[in-house]
Amino acid sequence: MNNTRIVFDCREYLGTVLPALLQRSHTPRLGKEVVIQFVVTDREDCNRFYAIDDQTLRVGEGVSDKVDLTLGFAADDLAAFSRSELDVERALAASRLKVMGDTTLVGWLSSRLQTATTLESKHP
């Protein structure tokens, strides 16, 4: 039996994996640029923001001056999201996800990630 445990790296996930998933999504674009901020409350070095428009996705480290939506959570909860062990509705109900700003973007982002994850499982 292999006891190797995979350690979740929030910097790798938010800096590489999440942007790749967002770019693979076929969810309709918004028709404008939006900035979505991810704040990892117990890992300041993991904070990232994403400037997303119809053509590009730009990833920035730290905290952006201009933000349309901010999502805040602990690193363990981010890891649970990445493994599909925690969804947005349960996280909000349990106060494990904090949302500030344009809350309509939460549904758009969730749909975008779900579409990308489905594509990933069909075409690894």
Image (cartoon, rainbow, N blue to C red):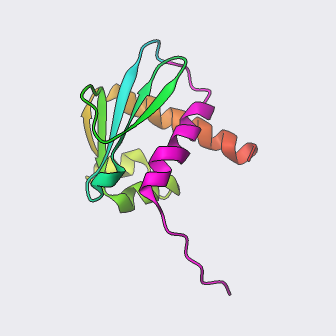
Tell me which residue sits at (26%, 54%) in the image. Answer: 41
Q: Which residue is most to the right? A: 123
Tell me which residue sits at (29%, 36%) in the image. Answer: 70
Relative height, residue 98 to residue 7 (above, below): above
Tell me where residue 117 appears, x and y as whole percent.
61, 43
Q: Which residue is most to the bottom? A: 1
Tell me where residue 65 appears, x and y as whole percent.
24, 28
Relative height, residue 35 to residue 90 (above, below): above
Relative height, residue 116 to residue 29 (above, below): below
The region drawn magenta spans 1-29
* Residue 86 visible in the current orientation: no
* Residue 52 visible in the current orientation: yes
Tell me where residue 73 appears, x and y as whole percent.
30, 52
Q: Quadrant of residue 100?
A: top left
- Image side of residue 91 versus residue 30, left or right: left
Tell me which residue sits at (36%, 27%) in the image. Answer: 35
Tell me where residue 115 appears, x and y as whole percent.
60, 36
Asked whether 13 falls inside the magenta stretch, the response is yes
Q: How many marks?
A: 0
Q: Quadrant of residue 107?
A: top left
Position of the N terminus, as image quadrant, is bottom right
Relative height, residue 111 to residue 87 (above, below): above
Asked whether 107 falls inside the magenta stretch, the response is no
- Image side of residue 117 versus residue 102, left or right: right
